[in-house]
Every structure is written in structure tokens, then in C-alpha cells.
């Protein structure tokens, strides 16, 4: 048993016992952290509102057998602006749900942590870009090593004739490599997705309304296929 310092972004929390909460965070150094905040549900809790979802916090933890106990917490970034806008809250919720699904315990998660932090910063700076979640999903896929092939055939590596797309095969396919179940995408959509995959979340190019919706659908279905689970928050964005 020992005291240690860490930091993380709060992904979610839920009641534990009469006055405590289990708080799940994403740490850059330790991946998914499952911690307990004792007495946080009491009116005079010493933690205040510092352990709300989306908060980036600095922690002092007492290591336990099953759950580490939070003994001190300081706010690094609260992202107040995004919390004041329902659309941004929904988008942020989708981001943390994806991060929660991707992150593993006791594994370095620097890339995923920085991706989530950058996404929240972008939302805090202003209204959600129509392609922000699509770009985030493509980058999240890359952090777990399943980034879709978008500018070359996932089968043979050819850069031309990419007329089909397959989730099991890993992205765009040429006519020679097409597989059963691969489906056709409109011309230009894979190029659009490739731009979103490469762009900075805080500096995305101007959206093309003719592609944005389809791009989000492809990115969502791709990561859900490889995670083998549905991301419920993404369904709200498609309503």
C-alpha cells in the first residue's frame, strides 16, 4: 500500500455505498483508473465538483487492493464552456465513451489521453465542428492500431480504383481485392475521411455538408465493428 500522484480526465462515475462514488478516469501513464472518492455524495464533501465527467484533474491516491482511494484532487481544467451547451456536452459524452471503451487498465495511454484532451479543448473553445467526432473516431481507431486504409487498398496497397469499403478488411478496397459484403462509397468520400484522419482536431478544414453525415456514419460503424460494441452516445448525434 502506498501514496502516489497521478492525473486524469474523468470518464464517468457511479454511486458506491451510502456516500461514496467510484470514479473512472483516463490517465496518460496508467490507462483506465478505477478509483473511489469517499464521502463525495455528502453535502459538505471536500471534493466539491472537481470530479465531474470531463474534468482534467491532478490526484493523490492511496493504493488499495481493488480500488485506489482519492485522498486529494486539484482541478487542472474544468471545460466550463462546453458544459453550457447541450450539443457540445453530447459530443463530449461520445468522446469519453469511446475513450472508456478503448482504454485498458495499467497500460500507458498517452496518445489516447492527448486525443481526448484535444477534443475537449476544441469543444470548450466553441461550437462543435460538424466533422469533429468523425475525426476523433478515426484517430481513436489509430491509437489501438486499427486505423482504416483510406488512400490505399487495404488488400494490396494500390492507390487507384478504390471503389469499395470493408470493415473486416480494414478500409478501402480496389475492385481486384473486393470481398463479399464490401460496399460502394460515393466518389470522394474516402478522400474526405483521409483528410479528417490527418487533420488537427482544433484546426479541421471547412465541412462539406454533402459528405459530413456519411463520413460520421462510416467512422462510427468502423470503430464499433473493431470494438465489438455499440457506442450509445453516437446514436444521439445521429438523431
Image (spheres, rainbow, N blue to C red):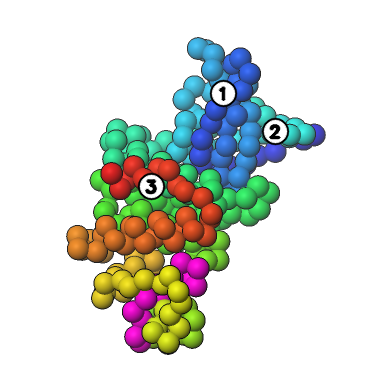
Quadrant location, the N terminus:
top right
Q: Position of residue 232 (x, y in %)?
A: 43, 43
**Is residue 170 rendered magenta in the image?**
yes
The residue sitting at 39% across, 66% down in the picture is 197
Q: Which residue is mark 2?
A: 67
**Relative to residue 74, is residue 166 depicted above or below?**
below
Report the mark closest to the observer, 3 or 2. Answer: 3
Query: Secondary structure under badge 1?
Result: strand
Report the mark closest to the observer, 1 or 2. Answer: 1
The residue sitting at 36% across, 81% down in the picture is 162
The residue sitting at 36% across, 62% down in the picture is 218
- The mark nearer the N terminus, 1 or 2, is 1
Q: Which residue is mark 3?
A: 234
Query: Which region shows up in magenta?
Result: 160-172
Q: CA distance from mark 3 to mark 1?
A: 25 Å
Q: Position of residue 227 (x, y in %)?
A: 53, 55
Q: CA distance from mark 3 to mark 2?
A: 30 Å
Identify the mark at residue 15; answer none if there is no mark.
Answer: 1
**Relative to residue 2, is residue 203 depicted above or below?**
below
- The mark nearer the N terminus, 3 or 2, is 2
- Name the residue nearer the viewer: 155 or 159: 155
Query: Secondary structure under badge 2?
Result: loop
Tag 1–tag 2 contact (CB < 8 Å): no
**Relative to residue 230, is residue 69 depicted above or below?**
above
Q: Outermost residue toward the left?
A: 209
**Is residue 163 rendered magenta in the image?**
yes
- Name the residue nearer the viewer: 123 or 224: 224
Q: Outermost residue toward the front?
A: 180
- The mark nearer the N terminus, 3 or 1, is 1
Q: Position of residue 161 (x, y in %)?
A: 34, 85
Amino acid at each position: 500500500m502506498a501514496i502516489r500522484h497521478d492525473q486524469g480526465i474523468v470518464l464517468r462515475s457511479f454511486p458506491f455505498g451510502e456516500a461514496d462514488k467510484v470514479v473512472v478516469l483516463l490517465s496518460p501513464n496508467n490507462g483506465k483508473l478505477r478509483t473511489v472518492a469517499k464521502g463525495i455524495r455528502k453535502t459538505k464533501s471536500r471534493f466539491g465538483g472537481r470530479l465531474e465527467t470531463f474534468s482534467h484533474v491532478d490526484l493523490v491516491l492511496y493504493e488499495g487492493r481493488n480500488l485506489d482511494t482519492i485522498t486529494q484532487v486539484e482541478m487542472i481544467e474544468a471545460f466550463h464552456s462546453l458544459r453550457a451547451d447541450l450539443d457540445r456536452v453530447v459530443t463530449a459524452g461520445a468522446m469519453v465513451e469511446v475513450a472508456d471503451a478503448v482504454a485498458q487498465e495499467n497500460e500507458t495511454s498517452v496518445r489516447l489521453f492527448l486525443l481526448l484532451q484535444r477534443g475537449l479543448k476544441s469543444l470548450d473553445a466553441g461550437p462543435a465542428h460538424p466533422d469533429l467526432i468523425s475525426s476523433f473516431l478515426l484517430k481513436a481507431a489509430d491509437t489501438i492500431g486499427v486505423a482504416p486504409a483510406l488512400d490505399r487498398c487495404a488488400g494490396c496497397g494500390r492507390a487507384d480504383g478504390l471503389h469499395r469499403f470493408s470493415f473486416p478488411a480494414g478500409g478501402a478496397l480496389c475492385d481486384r481485392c473486393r470481398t463479399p459484403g464490401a460496399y460502394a462509397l460515393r466518389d470522394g468520400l474516402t478522400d474526405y475521411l483521409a483528410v479528417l484522419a490527418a487533420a488537427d482536431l482544433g484546426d479541421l478544414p471547412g465541412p462539406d455538408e454533402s459528405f459530413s453525415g456519411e463520413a460520421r456514419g462510416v467512422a462510427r460503424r468502423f470503430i464499433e465493428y473493431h470494438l465489438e460494441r455499440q457506442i450509445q452516445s453516437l446514436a444521439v448525434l445521429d438523431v
